[in-house]
Image (tube, grey):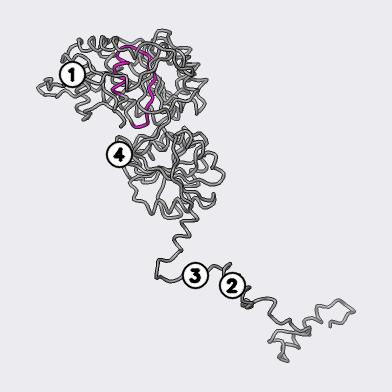
Amino acid sequence: MRQRPQKVVASRVCGSRKAVSGLFLHLAGEACLAPTNDSPDHAGVSFIHAATWKASRPPRRSCAVSHNNKDYSLTPFQDFGLAQPIVRALAEEKYVTPTPIQAQTIPLVLSRRDVIGIAQTGTGKTAAFALPILHQIFADRRHMKRKCCRVLVLSPTRELPGQILDSFRAYGRHVGISAALAIGGVSMRGQVRALLDGVDVLVATPGRLLDLVESNALRLGEVEVFVLDEADRMLDMGFIHDIRRIVAKLPARRQTLLFSATMPHAVGELARSMLRDAVKAAVTPGASTVAGVEQRIIRVDRAAKPGILADILNRESIDRALVFTRTKHGADKVVRSLVKAGIAAQAIHGNKSQNQRDRVLSGFRRGEVRTLVATDIAARGIDVDGISHVVNFDLPNVPETYVHRIGRTARAGARGIAISLCDAGEAAFLRDIEKLIRMSIPATDHSSLARQARRPAKGGHPMHPSAHQMSKQRRREGTPREQDRHAQPLRPPGWLPAFLHRKEGIKSVQKKTQSNAPHGERAI
């Protein structure tokens, strides 16, 4: 039986910094934090796993903190020694128990270690780094220099930074932080104004961040904590050179946190170049899928995909469906085919303006749009509860992308369904996906489904024979086919239509042919 990871326990002294000190002492005594070089793929990066934590912890006690005449019961998050304003915000958000990645990562970040966090999508990675960072800001308040930031968070897509910033503001609503957003697709003027007096937290995409740096609207010399979120997706989207340019501008003395859903070799190479004596907090295998997702494969012909997709959306009990295509043009084409089939759908991809993408995503989040068609730009940027189905209209050619796509459903312990349409040209992609996730996905041949639908039940009417079967039966019986062109008599040489057999018709035709004949010739 798989053992759940144990949570880290520190001395709990309500409302004081002694809890943090006790936590540091606790971590210092753990052998799992000692740097190791026992991994050939990630030399210099130490590893930490759930099984290494202590199996026992002191019994929890119930206490409360009074603030502004309100009582806030301490949740297990208080075990980490987080500042009381943060615990208060978590209680208001109804966060009770840390997820495994949070239980492992928060103490490490509080101890100022560089961390590699590996966990499935939808497991709370954002809170795993946001909560300890907010605690550090609260414990060491200072006036920021102009055009500078203390915390820099990078993420690959335009949608994801806004969600990360919302999390910082929600958890830090009682801390009083200053935060800004820097993403492409919108005017840079407002972002420049927001950075003039400096901010505590800046969440950005790589391209827009470099634009701000090159225009002297932002200086990175004061960054204390650097967070690279969705690192594997960053590399997939070709941001490796931008990331290296950004890291070269950061101070050498900093804390670096790298989070990812998978751990390909390229991410390990990047971690070795960026992190110092890092600890790897992994609660799942490097490329595992969410346990609550029911996965299916339907083998189809390429041309039959639009019709089968419409049939799936009509047949399944769907709350919200997210359909993935490989290209932007393909996403628009799928939307047109669904609308033609009477299914309302919207598309989101890189050719849409940021306002259009925000509007469509807001409608999807509110339930006004039940079917959203997206390219892989949204595989990491959509954090919407209640997605019951993910449909891969095109299988991804990068197997890790499959893990990210289906991670949009079954979030926060819910159940979900992932259906992939696989044509003959995508068979190699499917093999790579199954090799990565180390499981065989149940597959169904659509043609066999069609034959089963035509096959009658016992005692029912016989299935109507196909034209090919009727032709074979006629050949066996020697029966001529109706309207067989070989069975029709040939027309006689002098045959004329029936209306020309009348005398008037014959005369009129003769006059017409004679008038059209060349001069000096007699019409026959």
Instruction: Specify start and end residues of the magenta stretch as a single range.
Output: 102-122
| Residue highlighted by disc 1 | 58
**Reading the chain from its start, which is encountered first: label 4 or label 2?**
4
Any mark on residue 69, and which? none
List the single residue furthest toward the front: 1
Judged from the image, the secondary structure of the residue bearing numbered disc 1 is loop
Inspect this view and state whether residue 496 appears.
Answer: yes
Judged from the image, the secondary structure of the residue bearing numbered disc 3 is loop
Amino acid type at circle 1 is Pro
| Residue highlighted by disc 2 | 473
Between circles 4 and 3, the one closer to the viewer is 3
**Reading the chain from its start, which is encountered first: label 4 or label 3?**
4
Any mark on residue 464, and which? 3
Judged from the image, the secondary structure of the residue bearing numbered disc 2 is helix
Residue 104 within the segment the image draws in magenta? yes
Q: Is residue 217 left or right of residue 49?
A: right
List the single residue furthest toward the right: 520
Between circles 1 and 3, the one closer to the viewer is 1
Inspect this view and state whether residue 363 appears.
Answer: no
**Reading the chain from its start, which is encountered first: label 4 or label 1?**
1
Residue 220 image position (x, y, % from top left):
42, 12
At label 2, counting other C-alpha atoms closer than 10 Å, the crowd grade (few under 14, some 14-19, many 20 or more) is few
Amino acid type at circle 2 is Gln
| Residue highlighted by disc 4 | 414
**Reading the chain from its start, which is encountered first: label 2 or label 1?**
1
Per the model, the C-alpha gap separating discs 2 and 3 is 14 Å
